[in-house]
């Protein structure tokens, strides 16, 4: 049976926001600021405050502890073995060994999208609705991030 994210969204969005805000805070404490070359990449994809970005390299992307949120993230392709980066505002996880300019520019574009929305709480409902409606790959925010990928600095 296929996972129905649309019907689960009303219950999941507040949990997703809380989890994303906690990840943002954690990465803010342990993540590394961007060097000059990466600051330039972030500016090139539209980020207005790239100096706020922090990147944490991890062995794998963390899964939410909440079972319903974890199930939704895996079922929709937001998290899983093929995902190598995830952004929460200015906070970015990158899987160890996957830190390419292409992936970083993609994730930086998500930071830009969060900036445009104004907050995690404002961005996530729209992003999750896109995924629920058209799927991860066809979500407008993902199409936009892929369109702003840079191959090299």
Image: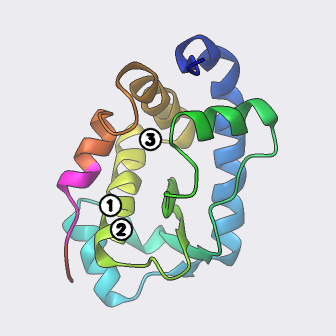
- The answer to whether the residue labelled 1 contacts the one labelled 3, judged by CB atoms less than 8 Å apart, is no
Looking at this rendering, what residue extends furthest in the top direction? 7
Left or right of 132, for residue 12: right
Q: Residues within 10 Å of mark 2 (few under 14, many from 20)?
A: many
Picture coordinates of residue 129, whole percent (x, y): 45, 23
Kindly state the secondary structure of the residue where label 2 is placed: helix
**Residue for badge 2:** 103
Q: Residues within 10 Å of mark 1 (few under 14, many from 20)?
A: many
Q: Residues within 10 Å of mark 3 (few under 14, many from 20)?
A: few
**Magenta residues, as a range?**
145-150
- Single out the mark in the foreground, 1 or 3: 1
Picture coordinates of residue 95, whole percent (x, y): 55, 72
**Residue for badge 3:** 118
Quadrant hosting residue 37: bottom left
Q: Nearer the viewer, residue 150 or 48?
A: 150
- The answer to whether the residue labelled 1 contacts the one labelled 2, judged by CB atoms less than 8 Å apart, is yes
Magenta stretch contains residue 148: yes
Against 43, residue 7 (above or below) is above
Q: Residue at x 39, y 19 (%)?
A: 133
Where's the C terminus, which quadrant?
A: bottom left
């Amino acid at each position: 049976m296929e996972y129905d994210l649309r019907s689960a969204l009303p219950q999941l969005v507040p949990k997703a926001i809380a989890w994303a805000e906690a990840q943002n805070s954690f990465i803010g404490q342990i993540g590394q600021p961007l060097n000059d070359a990466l600051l330039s990449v972030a500016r090139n994809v539209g980020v207005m405050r790239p100096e706020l970005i922090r990147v944490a390299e991890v062995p794998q992307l963390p899964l939410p502890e909440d079972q319903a949120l974890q199930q939704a993230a895996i079922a929709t392709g937001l998290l899983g073995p093929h995902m190598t980066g995830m952004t929460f505002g200015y906070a970015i996880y990158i899987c160890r060994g996957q830190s390419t300019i292409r992936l970083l520019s993609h994730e930086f574009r998500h930071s830009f999208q969060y900036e445009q929305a104004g907050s995690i709480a404002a961005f996530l409902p729209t992003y999750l609705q896109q995924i629920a409606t058209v799927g991860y790959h066809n979500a407008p925010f993902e199409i936009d991030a892929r369109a702003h990928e840079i191959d090299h600095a």
